[in-house]
Amino acid sequence: MLMIKKVLIANRGEIAVRVMRSCREMGIGTVAVFSEADRSSLHVRYADEAWFIGPSPSNESYLVIDKIIEAAKTSKADAIHPGYGFLSENAGFSERCRKEGVIFIGPSSHAISTMGDKITARETMINAGVSVVPGTKQAITDEAKAEKTANDIGFPVMIKASAGGGGKGMRLVKSNKDLLPGIRAAKSEALSSFGDDSVYIEKYIESPHHIEFQILADKHGNVIHLCERECSVQRRHQKVIEETPSPFVTPDLREKMGKDAVSAARAVNYEGAGTIEFLVDKDRNFYFLEMNTRLQVEHPITENVIGIDLVKEQIRIASGEKLSHKQSDIKQTGHAIECRIYAEDPDNNFMPSPGVIRHITEPGGPGVRCDGYVYEGYEIPLFYDPLISKLITWSESRADAIQRMKRALYEYKITGVKTTINFLERIMENKQFTGGIYDTHFIDENMDELAGTSADGLAEAEDIAIITAFIDYSDNLSKLQSIKPFQNNGGNSPWKNFGRKKGVTRM
């Protein structure tokens, strides 16, 4: 019997709706929180109750711990699910929930802080016997020592922010003359983005694959992995498309990486759902990159091939239950792909495209899942990530999953804002991608082809056609409404009883 009866979702958009759906299936009440910009958002409408937490900027609403805790206590929520982003990897938030007697559906503050600091995480993984990328073990404090380390490792090297993420505080340095300027630039950006200017040096892995392993761990010492996700289709270190199984990973490599992923989780006494990220070079040597101590954006593809609802597992683990599966139970079935649909303009350097959704038709049919939160008339705000939805397809083979994704993208129609749909369609047509022969440089190397204009011209024509048809429909509807309905002497339509047996009345 679950101890959790009501969950507050400390997030917004598609992930808030996604968590609420699993809660509803489990018979758990849901509480939404919302800012001024999100008053009409779908997660507010979907939840059992909703609480206003402040102005539109996230640092005045979704990132204010006091407001989240107050909403949880006022609504009498047993637990808080942080989703991803915002406070999901905030050790202080996890600890505050514990002190306030509210269950945090996620790991302990110790696990979050240990794995959230990349230097500490590297040291922890080394001690656990997990392979890491060659580099410094401590933050750079002496530029002369940094130069010696970089020359010992060999160029090119990466400068990375210890508290970083999303490509911020990161610099690729190809020669000694660029090292110190690179370190200073990375430190400045890290301080601005994270309030911490600690950076370290790491060997740059050329032509790498970004492979991550989903793990689950309970409060009783049980840890399993749910296989890998290939996340190498990236732009500026941000994931664009993910798939599972990886076309690059062999069964032997999967077994080795899976064992290291479990060891990494055990090293910090992890609880809940998490992700161990690796870089894999062209010779299939793999190195620990980082751990995400939360649910990942791309978790649905794992759910599709493994058959486990990860949100439900998170809730059960937080309630103190043991894992419902053993490692021997985990089998991959079929192939799944996820495309992230953003309100961005690919023809204008992927600039965010906020605005009102004028028309939306989401794809459907066998093997298609669309995790979104927008609707016709909804205004995408300026204040948050421009993710509109996640489009997921599943089929028995990779080739069929790609064909299904192409069909689903063709069906996906959105007007009113620019989107990345056409850009994703071109990736699905790319021979490198369809052949499974790609790494993290894929988009950069193919940008000329992927930034083609012919498909965008067609999409624009389709948008105009949809708008024209809607205007025509509206005009005709007005004319029809002006016509008085037919009435016979009895005041009833002659069609009401057409085809019915005499004496039979239907209400």
Image (tube, rainbow, N blue to C red):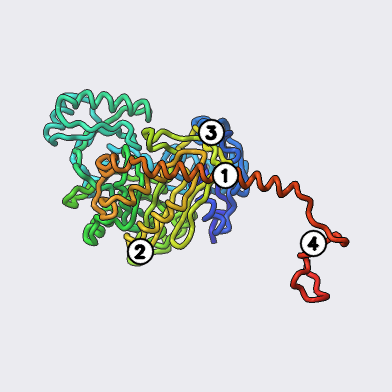
How crowded is the residue under tag 3: few (<14 C-alpha within 10 Å), some, or many (20+)?
many
Residue at 57%, 46% (x, y): give it. 469
Q: Which residue is mark 4?
A: 493
Residue at 59%, 40% (x, y): give it. 71
Q: CA distance from mark 1 to mark 2?
A: 34 Å
> Are the residues flagged by discs 2 and 3 in contact, CB closer than 8 Å?
no
> Are the residues flagged by discs 2 and 4 in contact, CB closer than 8 Å?
no
Q: Which residue is mark 2?
A: 334
Q: CA distance from mark 3 to mark 4?
A: 55 Å
Say what amino acid the circle numbered 4 marks: Ser
Quadrant (top left/top right/bottom left/bottom right) for the C terminus: bottom right
* Residue 127 visible from this viewpoint: no
Q: Which mark is residue 112?
A: none
Q: CA distance from mark 1 to mark 3?
A: 25 Å
Q: Which mark is residue 376?
A: 1
Q: Which residue is mark 3?
A: 61
Residue at 64%, 45% (x, y): give it. 474
**Element on which disc 2 rests:** loop
- Camera-nearest label, 2 or 4: 4
